[in-house]
Amino acid sequence: MDIKHIVSQLTLEEKASLCSGADDWHTEKIDRLGIPNIMMSDGPHGLRKVVDVDENEIWKGATVKATCYPSGAGLASSWNRELIYGVGKALGKEAKGEKLSILLGPAINIKRSPVCGRNFEYYSEDPFLAGKLAASFINGVQSEGVGTSLKHFAVNNHEYRRHSTNPIVDMRTLREIYLTAFEIAVKESNPATIMHSYNRINGCQVSKSKWLLDGVLRDEWGYEGIVISDWGGMNDRVASLDAGCDIEMPSSGGVRDDMIVKAVKEGRLDERILDKTVERILKTVYKYLPENNAPKADLEKNCGYAAFVAEETMVLLKNEKNLLPLDGERPLAVIGEFGSNIRFQGRGSSRVNAAYVEHPLKYIKRFNKAEVCYAPGYELSGDVNTPNEALINEAVACAKKCGRALVFIGLPDEFESESYDRADMRLPDSHNELVRRIAEEVPDTVVVLTCGSPVEMPWLDRVSTLFLTYLGGSGAGLALAGLLYGAVSPSGKLAETFPVKIEDNPAYLNYPGIYDDVVYAEGVFVGYRYYQKKKMKVNFPFGFGLSYTKFSYDEIVADGDRVKVKVTNVGKIAGKEVVQLYVCPPKSAVVRPDRELKGFTKIFLAPGESKWVEFTLDDRSFAYYDVRVNDWRVETGDYTVFVGGSSVDTPLSVVIKKQDKNPYVPEITDNTPLIDIINNPGYDGIRDEFLLGFFKPEMRIEAEKKGIHVSNQTVFPRKYQTPRMYVRGGKDTVTEDDIAESVKQFNNKLKNK
Ligand code: GLC
């Protein structure tokens, strides 16, 4: 397809029309030249293909029956690249069957605050994990010839005032935390499209941030796909096109296309930029044209696959009395409406019209040979918050009669959604009270928690057993029953920290911000990076999750940047383990997290089986972003590599020495602190003469007399002073020109070193 030739045949008006949608979901077509359109649809864990738009109600409108997979928070808890690739592939097939060309996902914004309404949809608080898993998802979908839309680029970490919010983020934090997941995904999967976010960053609307779209995304990361706006997220169409945003979605009915035409005619927009944009758009359209005879997916079969996936997304958080796996020989009380009607997805644009949904009670009854009693315990409509005494009493009686209970609690649908944030991290009072009362009466209580993001757990010390389902998709109930009865051993690990209370979260004091401005004052200390640096207690740490078996971490070997680890299943049943690798930097010129995730892999081990797991690290595994040179820097020193089954349980470690390959040796000025001149090895050989010009011999004699050996490496009492402070009159006059001359000579010697 000679795209350039096609572009050369287009009129200016036709080119401009291609830069916005034809409607809510389609790109524009040009019948005159036979240019087709393609259809895009949500979402990140199931198709939301709108087939009958209800103009009066956003999110409504009939959508096709589809398979709902675990939402992003759950998918990420699998830590399983291959599994997520498989989900992508299955969604790609389903999309193909519906003639969809672009699936609007994955959504990978970093979980800065636990109360962000869309955290259920997002992957993690850690950019490495989010980026790697997003790449797997994208490669899976695109392996079926269906494109994706990596979103929301970037720094869209809360729903509060989302269309006008202005995160204020320092460059190091931006690079290390909020851009890295997108960078990894772009470089490892080349998504067909990237959806830019609604917000500003440091005062600049993302939709017209040339630095971010053309600069970072395209020039630095080599991205070759197209950038689409979030729906209704377009700002200043001409500046946005110039900045690198290709398609405004949805259509603005030609209003903004006309702005493009006018700008070109008036010489405010170079038509060559428009041509390049149209080329990118047409390349994407022709690359992802739908297959005409693609078969519709078998939704019933896919529901079974969704259950298989969900098994790895649920996380066993407590099992102190080994109540799990349950035996089916004893009566069991199933308490809580989520047990009969599990919440399996979140609200908003990711909403799926699920063709099938498997609820827990049906399958618990199959696994449990003895009697199963059920009591709703609370209401999921009307006043969901106020404890209902009658329902609680009924539930307590049911639990006492059976002698053991599964208590299903969680966040009702309206508690977490796109377009608004949670007010706090609380569960409904009715759910907290139910757990308290049941656990008080029935020691063998297992709590099953269904939510898309962390919650406070006032009853946690009273409960020995806790299972987190997240939002498990169509197959949630079947997957959960299999896990509870040991058909499969849990292998999920948290991809986000569960703090004790919202006030502990590093964003708390700067959330949701002042009017539109939200200062990301915590910097890189997001999630576990913060809690570990502060040595703060959390309910459940990043990377944590229990199994029905046990794994031992036996050996670690490092060979250059390659690290090998031997892991053994020392338990009696088979299981999967997520082997996690964290890097701890040496004492640094900047404040750095104590450890950061730089490797993970999930392995299956039969009882008694051992496997060696290999990680290949690279410079970025050791680097921080140095804003002095706007580039990544690996400082010289000893890096400790920790490996284990969670961010707080890393029994193996090894030291890897690194050398700064590009040391920072700037020219000095009359305001360079002497400590910087003393400490920087790049000044070796020219330092002494310069310093002694200031530290007159008598000062050295004076110090020596006091028995203080003054060497250039010894920290001078004047370490923070600067050359300009040595201007003085009298016997040994030193003028500002003298200082300037000394500095100039020093820099000349540096240049000639
Ligand atoms: C939204 C969402 C985005 C979604 C789009 C289309 O407002 O932010 O994630 O893909 O609209 O529904």
Image: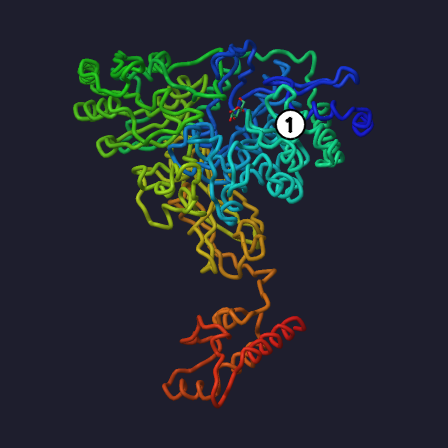
- Residue found 24% across the figure and 26% down from its top: 432
Task: Tell me if I can see residue 614 in this picture.
Answer: yes
Quarter where residue 364 is shown: top left
Q: How far across and how far down the image is residue 378, in percent?
A: 26, 16
Q: Label 1 neighbourhood size at 10 Å, few (<14), some (14-19), many (20+)?
A: many
Name the outermost residue toward the bottom.
731
Quarter where residue 101 is shown: top right
Q: How far across and how far down the image is residue 136, in percent?
A: 57, 32
Q: In which quadrant will I find the N terminus?
A: top right
Q: Is residue 113 left or right of residue 249?
A: left
Q: Secondary structure at mark 1?
A: loop
Q: Is residue 279 left or right of residue 156?
A: right
Q: Nearer the viewer, residue 653 or 520?
A: 520
Q: Nearer the viewer, residue 486 or 292?
A: 292
Q: Is residue 446 left or right of residue 570?
A: left
Q: In which quadrant will I find the C terminus?
A: bottom right
Q: How far across and how far down the image is residue 279, in percent?
A: 74, 30
- Residue found 58% across the figure and 40% down from its top: 183
Q: Is residue 328 left or right of residue 729?
A: left
Does any atom of ligand 1 lie closer than 8 Å to the CB of label 1?
Answer: no
Task: Tell me if I can see residue 354 in this picture.
Answer: no
Q: Nearer the viewer, residue 733 or 273?
A: 733
- Residue found 49% across the figure and 56% down from its top: 639
- Asked which colour scheme the image uses, the reply is rainbow
Q: Is residue 670 above or below residue 689?
A: above
Quarter where residue 338 is shown: top left
Q: Is residue 80 above or below residue 527?
A: above
Q: Which residue is tagged 1?
A: 247
Say what amino acid the circle numbered 1 marks.
Ile
